[in-house]
Amino acid sequence: MKVLLLGSGGREHAMAWKLAQSPLCQKLYIAPGNPGTALEGENISLEILDFDGIGRFCLEREIDMVIVGPEAPLVEGIVDYFAQKPELTSIPVIGPSREAARLEGSKSFAKLFMKRHSIPTAAYKEYQIGQLDQAMSDLDRHALPLVLKADGLAAGKGVLICHQRDEAKAELRAMLEGKFGEASSTVVVEEFLQGREMSVFALSDGLNWVLLPNAKDYKRIGEGDSGPNTGGMGAICPVPFASEGLMERIKEQIVGPTVEGLQKDGLRYQGFIYFGLMIVDQEPWVIEYNCRLGDPETQAVLPMLRSDLLGLLQRVPGQQLNDVVMEYEQGFAATVILSSAGYPAEYQTGYLISGIEQARGALVFHAGTKTDENGQLRTSGGRVLAVTGKNNKLFSALEQAFTALEHIDFEGLSFRRDIGHDLM
Ligand code: AMP
Ligand code: GLY
């Protein structure tokens, strides 16, 4: 197969790494990719939202499948674009339709979906600016802490956990008055769930589904889960506390009903579903849906998947995932993100990166890197590299990652040393 993968982060490097291992993969293109994906296939300078350009490229190069890494092209309707163009309809795009991608793009849509299909999620109410007085008086009686969520995509900043009533009221008002523009014209106010977070990843063909290995993400910048939220500073796969019993409940109460619900609602979804879960007393609750794989979870999850990823994806368009037996690797993968000083706030880029060749015994995925005019590798993002160790024991997987990353250097290099410590 000739495959086009869209995206340019660490997740996409891990996806390209896995896809390139498939005996089915005849040619892999990545648009726009990064210096890491260039080691696995051919980078193409196409923008991920340039659907006309992507379509033309697919016809020219006779692409057999398009795989989408980040949510933006899905939320913008790349699946519908291909489905509606007669010359492109035969090229499958892995991912949900624009309408189904609202599971990620709109918290309000996701909450209504879960309510309609009896999928466990925190109790909530939603408000718009016209309901400001009602919202303020409801907040007077709401249990604390409580969670405020901007309805739309707000660059990862749209969720706020409030411990003080005054803070909650001021924030809710600011959001409804346009703090995040259109994204917060509707705000979901949600009950706070106290528990342990984990992420579950399904691949659905619209009828059947399989699970990839599960993972835990470390979202806060600081050790001990302190400081602001980031895209993710590390990941462990699989989650040691995810017992067989818990996974059964997740499948029965959440994954199955979600895929059936999409079908009942007539929402076309042939792609990855990311379930952000809170486990409260061994019971799973959905915190959020994403319509793509996680970053950096993918950098830990795909090294733990023994099954051929492209082999699985090939079965999606024809809805043939029903008789697949998934194969996972034994043990654990531990991913540590090397970030730029200052991230997730302002940070500098363009620093020379050294030592990747010496970082043996671990996988090094590129996230925010670029090659300069002299062919030297430099930083170009907040999250720069993802280093993944793999071993039968979680402790040893972490040790491999930390030993390998000691060789890597760039100005301002930062990372969390406590990734996985809560799980040992
Ligand atoms: P989200 O952007 O929906 O992933 O939310 C960001 C983070 O907020 C999650 O990873 C959780 O840690 C936290 N969070 C969201 N909703 C809740 C909730 N209902 N109870 C507790 N924590 C939550
Ligand atoms: N690591 C969290 C996410 O990908 O949304």
Image (spheres, helix red, strand yellow):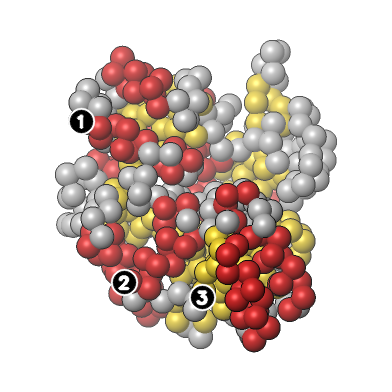
Determine whether the residue tagged by mark 1 lies in a helix, strand or loop. Answer: loop
* Crowdedness near tag 2: few (<14), some (14–19) or many (≥20) residues, C-alpha within 10 Å: some
Residue 206 location (% of width, % of height): 24, 53
The residue lying at 47 percent from left, 83 percent from top is: 282
The residue lying at 71 percent from left, 72 percent from top is: 168
User: What residue is shown with label 3?
Assistant: 124
Query: Residue 90: which disc?
Result: 1
Q: Is residue 33 left or right of residue 180?
A: left
Q: Amino acid at mark 3?
A: Tyr
Can see residue 349? yes
Determine whether the residue tagged by mark 3 lies in a helix, strand or loop. Answer: strand
Query: Residue 317: which disc?
Result: none
Q: Earlier in the sequence, mark 3 or mark 2?
A: 2
User: What residue is shown with label 2?
Assistant: 117
Residue 140 location (% of width, % of height): 68, 83
Can see residue 234? no
Closest to the camera, between mark 2 and mark 1, is: 2
Q: Amino acid at mark 2?
A: His
Position of 221 relative to 2 (above/below): below
Seen from the viewer's position, the closer of residues 265 and 121 is 265
Determine whether the residue tagged by mark 2 lies in a helix, strand or loop. Answer: loop
Q: Amino acid at mark 1?
A: Ser
Determine which quarter of the picture holds residue 309.
top left
Q: Is residue 188 left or right of residue 346?
A: left
